Image: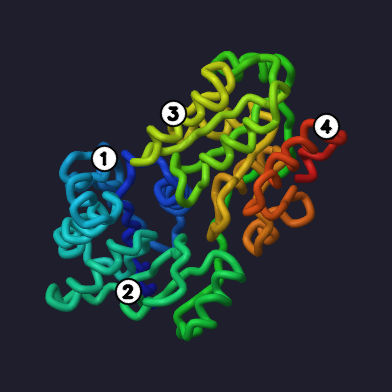
Amino acid sequence: MPTAPRPRVLLACAGLDHARRGFESFARDCFAALRDEGAIELELVKGSGPDRDRERALPGLRRDRAVARALGRVAGARPFRFEHAAFGVSLQRELLRRDPDVVYLSEWDTARMLARLRGPMRRRFALVLCNGTTATAGFGHLDLVQELTPAALEAGLARGADPRRHVLLPLGFSIAREHVAPTAEERVALRTRFELPPDRHVVVSVAALNRREKRLDHLVEEVASLGEARPFLLLVGEPEAETPSIRALARERLGERGHAIRTVPHADVAPLLRACDTFVLASLGEVLPRALIEAHAAGLPCLAHDFATTRFVLGRHGRLADLRRPGALAALLRDRLARPDAPGAPGER
């Protein structure tokens, strides 16, 4: 008896391999985890980088280039939105060549472009969106929406979303079964490698280097308010238009020796976390913050705003407060500095 053909799935990500944000990290991890899964035929299409086995780059409009930035200034929109929409157009040749059953992606504007074009192009693939945004409506062009937290699913259904086309499925992470704390020698080596002070408490935030969503200006001010005994602040993330103002504020409020701002490959995030002492997420709204989960998996105490997502992610281990209040984050940091970890606490986290 003949076996049914395996579904052909095209994983599409415009920002891979030139952007370093959650969508791109997820696409890379998802492809690595599922490329050898026998139940599907999975191929990856990205916006830059080398071609590899079952991995194809479609170079085109990029968010970090002058054309996308100019379009963003004229339209009053972020450059990555033009990158994502243009990528949807570039995908048409691959769709004709590969004829997938499913296109799986996280980028809203790419999905909209594909939905507009699949009718005229007479393509029958299903569009499945991993909804890593705060969108709760406007899903009519999609065949299935993957919601990442119970709160996100509830919000969409409350706005009238079709429950048959929305499914709760949090992102997957590769987490060791047992936590192995870094030795003293490893910490020295890691801090030397990443040029971190050897003898100071290091607070790290892994987030896009902006003010609007990630509120890094607020984080800088809260750390600065702790005075001379304040910890060293490390900001790790993808530069954006607001990044120069974040750099200037950090230099003014923390001094050159009181902070560092870095952009690193995704492979460096895990060892970087092992070199640090505390993780902070200053944003007031997130869908499912990868960096927070990765920091928790590394055993770090995580300080964040108290809302449904952080309670879902961190459970009883989170150190949460209403970060809309000035001084609330500083109080969490002060308490963390005054209360060292109990033995076994990183493993429990």
In the rendered image, residue 253, in percent from the top left (x then y), is placed at 55, 27
Label 3 neighbour load within 10 Å: few <14, some 14-19, many 20+: few
**Disc marking residue 78:** none
Q: Which secondary structure, mark 1?
A: loop
From the image, tell me which residue sits under label 4: 338
From the image, tell me which residue sits under label 3: 248
Instruction: Find the distance from the CA under tag 3 to the CA under tag 4.
Output: 29 Å
From the image, tell me which residue sits under label 2: 126
- What residue is shown at x 50% (from left), y 25% (from top)? 252
Instruction: Find the distance from the CA under tag 2 to the CA under tag 1.
Output: 30 Å
Q: Which of marks 3 and 2 is in front?
A: 3
- What residue is shown at x 30% (from left), y 52% (from top)? 78
Q: Which secondary structure, mark 4?
A: helix
Ranked by sequence position, the earlier of labels 3 and 4 is 3
Q: Measured along the vertical axis of the image, is residue 194 above or below residue 163?
A: above
Q: Which of marks 1 and 4 is in front?
A: 4
